[in-house]
Amino acid sequence: MILERGRRVYDYNGASNSGFVVSQKFKDIVEEFDKDEHQFFQVEILNGDHSPYAGGNYYLMHVRQPLDTIITDGSDLQQVMPLSKEPEHKKNLHVGAYSHFTVSAERVNGAGLWLEVRAGTHYFASEALLQRFKEEDVQG
């Protein structure tokens, strides 16, 4: 990965279907919660002049923990294909930035980061993981 002049890399850098780039600090914290659940591939980061970036180790991360945690009772979530013949508990849900819903603590079961199986490509993080990020001043 080559940075544009003057750019820096944060602890968390975007998300895509390919994964996202995370720092060693981010990786270490996630692994406190989800040891051996996710994939991390080390990436070489270079400055615009092709000199090594001095910000430490970075990784391409793939979230590999699919969980079904959304509680639909009392939510405002809409089914993506409401006429589908899938059982209600298996239908995909449209989750937006302003959606209101809760997740099941029992189904989360201590996980830190997961891919919500009924919400397409949405990644979810536990309150405990977010608190650890805050304590360690994770940026991004």
Image: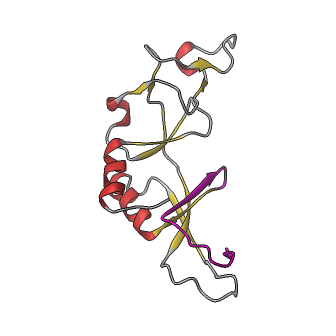
Q: Is residue 91 left or right of residue 11?
A: right
Furthest residue in direction front, as rendered: 6
Residue 78's image quarter? top right
* Residue 135 inside the magenta-drawn segment: no
Q: In the visual, does 129 lie left or right of 19?
A: left
Q: Give the colour scheme shown.
A: secondary structure
Residue 15 on the magenta span: yes
Boundaries of the magenta span:
1-18
The residue drawn where x is 61% and y is 24% is 92
Residue 127 position (above or below residue 21): above
Q: Is residue 80 or residue 98 the one in the foreground?
A: 98
| Residue at x 38% of width, y 47% of height | 112
Q: Residue at x 29, y 58 (%)?
A: 135
Q: Position of residue 7 (x, y in %)?
A: 61, 73
Main structural element of the magenta stretch: helix, strand or loop?
loop
Residue 1 x %, y %:
67, 73
Quarter residue 101 falls in: top left
Q: How many marks?
A: 0
> Residue 18 location in percent, x, y?
66, 55
Which residue is at 38% across, 64% downward? 28
Q: Residue 26, how many percent across, how many down?
A: 43, 62
